[in-house]
Image (tube, rainbow, N blue to C red):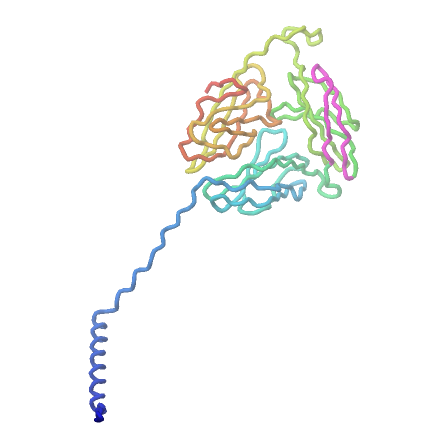
């Protein structure tokens, strides 16, 4: 038997549809009355913690002079590689040769800069990098540059005289000899200097030869030679030679015979101070000053001490440095190797630390403890 199907009439469909629409309208109205649903809280990323690990930038490399005039030297270098943090700049130190003062220039994250200078002057430059947290790289090899005297024409200084020697190396007089220097135009002569080991160079004379007879006026004289050309440009200095025996024997005639033996030298006497000149969360700047409180010069000084904290030197000036664990060693430069009686030498340094920067208890010079 066949079943019949009853289809909804159009009237019934309209009623169902109207009912549904009415229910939807009620839902919408209720939602609107309650206000919009609160938005989901945005996720907050964890704050980034800066890397404060004491990993400094790498030491700048290929440090060089790209130009030198009578009034400036242009320097360039290859950029340092970052350590824990981005490199933010560079510190350039420089000083005139055979002097006891120097300068420091801070530049941004660049790889070249120009330094104002004086004509006919030999300079020694060095550079290190730093980041925003104060971490500093090691110091580059020292760069030696001499500025020309001429401002036009021949502005190329001669090469330095080589193989300077003194014979004899003790006594009231000595003969200095050296090898012929070269120049792009021609060497016209040589300037001969005596250096007091501190900051005074005395021009003894000029000669067109490659030898010079000089008097010895102190217990340990230092001599060096510079070549010059027709334009007045002078070379970088030769090596330095030392001659002893210039001082008269106490209690005797300087023209009489020397005694067969000399009395023993008085013991070394010194005073040493260590001063933190600047301290921040991860580093420090400090000075070590040694004063000669004795009656004879301190020659070829070497300063040693042990830090009281975890300080570590990363840069120094007026001396070279090494450090093993807490023990630091500071060795004289060629131009300040003698501390005269009553004189002093100051060595500066940058360093890193995490603990309080406790100064050393005792400072030693050539193995002798200094008073504080």
- Indicate whether 72 appears above or below 308: below
Residue 73 seen by the camera: yes
Q: Residue at x 65, y 18 (%)?
A: 220
Toward the viewer: 358 or 253?
358
Residue 152 percent across, percent down from the top left:
73, 43
Where the N terminus falls, by quadrant?
Answer: bottom left
Left or right: residue 105 versus residue 149 is: left
Indicate yes or no whether the magenta region holds residue 143. no
Toward the viewer: 230 or 278?
278
Residue 348 percent across, percent down from the top left:
52, 31
Q: Quadrant of residue 340?
A: top right
Q: Residue at x 55, y 23 (%)?
A: 302
- Indicate whether 354 appears above or below 248: below
What segment carries the magenta color?
A: 158-184
Q: Quadrant of residue 193?
A: top right
User: What is the count of numbered marks?
Assistant: 0
List the single residue furthest toward the front. Answer: 1
Q: Main secondary structure of the magenta part?
A: loop
Q: Residue at x 54, y 25 (%)?
A: 345
Left or right: residue 223 versus residue 371 is: right
Left or right: residue 59 versus residue 151 is: left
């Amino acid at each position: 038997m066949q079943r019949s199907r009853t289809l909804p009439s159009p009237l019934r469909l309209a009623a169902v549809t109207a009912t549904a629409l009415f229910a939807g309208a009620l839902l919408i109205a209720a939602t609107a009355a309650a206000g919009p649903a609160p938005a989901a809280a945005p996720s907050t990323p964890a704050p980034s913690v800066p890397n404060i690990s004491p990993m400094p930038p790498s030491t700048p490399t290929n440090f060089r002079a790209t130009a030198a005039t009578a009034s400036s030297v242009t320097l360039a270098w290859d950029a340092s590689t970052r350590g824990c943090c981005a490199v933010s700049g560079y510190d350039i130190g420089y000083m005139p040769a055979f002097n006891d003062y120097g300068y420091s220039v801070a530049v941004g994250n660049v790889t070249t800069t120009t330094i104002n200078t004086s004509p006919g002057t030999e300079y020694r430059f060095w550079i290190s990098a730093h980041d925003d947290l104060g971490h500093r790289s090691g110091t580059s090899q020292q760069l030696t540059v001499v500025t020309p005297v001429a401002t036009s024409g021949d502005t190329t200084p001669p090469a330095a005289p080589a193989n300077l020697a003194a014979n004899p190396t003790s006594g009231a007089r000595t003969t200095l000899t050296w090898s012929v220097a070269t120049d792009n135009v021609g060497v016209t002569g040589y300037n001969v200097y005596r250096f007091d080991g501190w900051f005074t160079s005395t021009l003894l004379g000029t000669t067109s030869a490659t030898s010079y007879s000089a008097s010895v006026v102190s217990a340990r004289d230092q001599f060096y030679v510079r070549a010059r050309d027709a334009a007045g440009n002078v070379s970088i200095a030769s090596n330095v030679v030392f001659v002893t025996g210039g001082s008269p024997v106490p209690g005797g005639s300087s023209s009489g015979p020397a005694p067969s033996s000399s009395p023993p030298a008085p013991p070394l006497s010194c005073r040493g101070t260590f001063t933190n000149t600047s301290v921040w969360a991860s580093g420090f700047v400090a000075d070590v000053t040694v004063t000669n409180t004795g009656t004879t010069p301190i020659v070829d000084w070497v300063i040693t001490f042990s830090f009281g904290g975890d300080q570590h030197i990363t840069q120094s000036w007026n001396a070279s440095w090494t450090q093993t664990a807490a023990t630091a060693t500071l060795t004289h430069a060629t131009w300040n190797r003698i501390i005269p009686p009553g004189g002093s030498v100051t060595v500066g340094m940058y360093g890193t630390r995490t603990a309080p920067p406790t100064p050393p208890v005792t400072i030693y010079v050539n193995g002798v403890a200094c008073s504080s």
